[in-house]
Image (cartoon, helix red, strand yellow):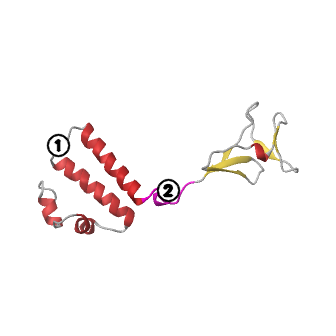
């Protein structure tokens, strides 16, 4: 929890018996209706009566983004790196693409292994992929 402080004296607000929040420093009152937070924050009061807020987060990326959005973002990120580094065809680009495909499959199936990624994404065996650039030897 992040405490909400009085703008005038920088002391946290505390709940009073009227359901309002009072600054212990200057006595300024803050009505709950005046608490303005963005959509990902919720106000709360801790055991000591201090007013604060918590940031609500999704338990998973899938709750805030579609699979297509995640896939597009991962692929765009890979393209940005490939372009910025001036990579053409070669082992680095192939490795980046293996990471992209593996990451996307891991979102769909967190327990997936490399062999299963290869099976679902490529028309080649693990051994063939490892042989592309002498990997794994």
Q: From the top left corner, tell me how far across and down residue 29 is, in percent.
A: 83, 39
The residue pinned by badge 2 equals 64
Residue 82 image offset from top left, x and y in percent: 25, 43
Q: Residue furthest right?
A: 18
**Residue 77's spot in the image, x, y percent?**
33, 46
Quick check: marks 1 and 2 in contact, CB under 8 Å?
no
- Foreground pick, 73 / 81: 73
Q: Which residue is mark 1?
A: 88
Q: Main secondary structure of the magenta part?
A: loop
Helix, strand or loop at label 2? It is helix
User: Can residue 44 be spotted in the picture?
Assistant: yes
Horizontal side of residue 57 vs 129, given as left or right: right
Give the SS element for disc 1.
loop
Residue 110 appearing in the image: no
Count up the numbered dots: 2
Indicate left or right for 90 with 56 as reference: left
Magenta segment, which residues? 57-66
Residue under the image location 40 percent in, 54 percent down: 69
The image shows residue 66, relative to residue 41, as above or below, that is below
| Above or below for 8 versus 134 | above
Q: Residues within 10 Å of mark 2 (few under 14, many from 20)?
A: few
Mark 1 vs mark 2: which is more N-terminal? 2
Left or right of 81: which side holds 127?
left
Question: Which quarter of the figure is the C terminus placed in?
Answer: bottom left
Mark 1 and mark 2: Cα distance apart in space: 34 Å
For image coordinates 73% across by 44% down, the residue present is 35
Does the magenta segment cover residue 39? no
Query: Which circle marks residue 37 in the picture?
Result: none
Query: Residue at left 20%, top 47%?
Result: 92
**Where is residue 70, by image quadrant?**
bottom left
Q: Residues within 10 Å of mark 1 (few under 14, many from 20)?
A: few
């Amino acid at each position: 929890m992040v405490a909400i402080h009085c703008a005038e004296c920088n002391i946290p607000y505390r709940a009073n018996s009227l359901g309002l929040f009072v600054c212990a420093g200057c006595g300024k009152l803050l009505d709950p209706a005046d608490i303005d937070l963005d959509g990902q924050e919720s106000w709360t009061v801790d055991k000591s009566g201090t007013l604060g807020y918590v940031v609500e987060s999704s338990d998973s990326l899938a709750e805030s983004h579609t699979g297509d959005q995640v896939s597009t973002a991962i692929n765009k990120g890979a393209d940005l790196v490939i372009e910025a580094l001036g990579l053409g065809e070669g082992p680095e680009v192939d490795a980046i693409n293996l990471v992209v495909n593996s990451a996307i499959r891991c979102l769909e199936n967190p327990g997936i292994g490399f062999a299963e990624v290869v099976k679902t994404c490529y028309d080649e065996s693990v051994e063939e992929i490892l042989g592309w650039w002498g990997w794994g030897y």
